[in-house]
Amino acid sequence: TAKDWPPLFNRILQSRIFDYYRRQKVKNHWIRLFPGFENEFEENLIENAPAREDCQPDDKLKQLQAMNTLEVAIKALPQRQQQAFLLRTWEGLDVAETAASMGCSQGSVKTHYSRAVHSLRQVLEEYL
């Protein structure tokens, strides 16, 4: 009915505002880690980060290999583990928000996230 629209609209608007500020928080975190990107936020900050002055070419190569390995490892995870890992780590959602986004319980999110981190650690062990 017509009475239901204003509260629904307000809830959608509130959610969009929270999403915006949450993304800004994550974005600002990455910009603080890589200060060369204050003016222009790059999609792949880690790969495009300025090299340290003492960085050797083989160190840069190893970093690129680690990033490629990480990307492949994330894609190899089961879908639910990918979702939990990316929502928690990259999007900066907490357990409750991740559970709501995934449509599952908080315990399920914790399990999927833990398994994803464990799998990624095993794959990336040589780079850690």
Image: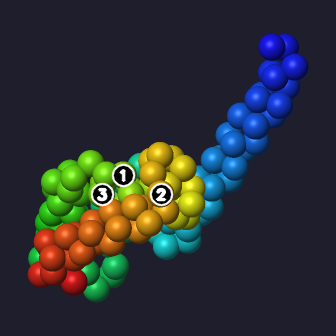
Q: Residue at x 15, y 81 (%)?
A: 125
In x, y percent, where is residue 12?
A: 71, 34
What is the count of numbered marks? 3
Which is nearer the N-term, disc 3 or disc 2?
A: 3
Viewer-proximal residue, 60 or 113?
Answer: 113
Q: Is 68 placed above or below 59 here? A: above
Residue underneath mark 3: 81
In x, y percent, where is residue 108?
A: 40, 61
Left of 95 or right of it: where is 71?
left
Residue underneath mark 2: 105
Name the quadrant containing residue 84. Answer: bottom left
Viewer-proximal residue, 63 or 51?
Answer: 63
Mark pair 3, 1: CA separation: 5 Å
Query: Is the Cβ of the residue at disc 3 closer than 8 Å to that at disc 1?
Result: yes
Q: Residues within 10 Å of mark 1 (few under 14, many from 20)?
A: many
Q: Can residue 29 be seen at all in this image of the molecule?
A: yes
Q: Residue at x 22, y 53 (%)?
A: 78
Viewer-proximal residue, 78 or 19?
Answer: 78
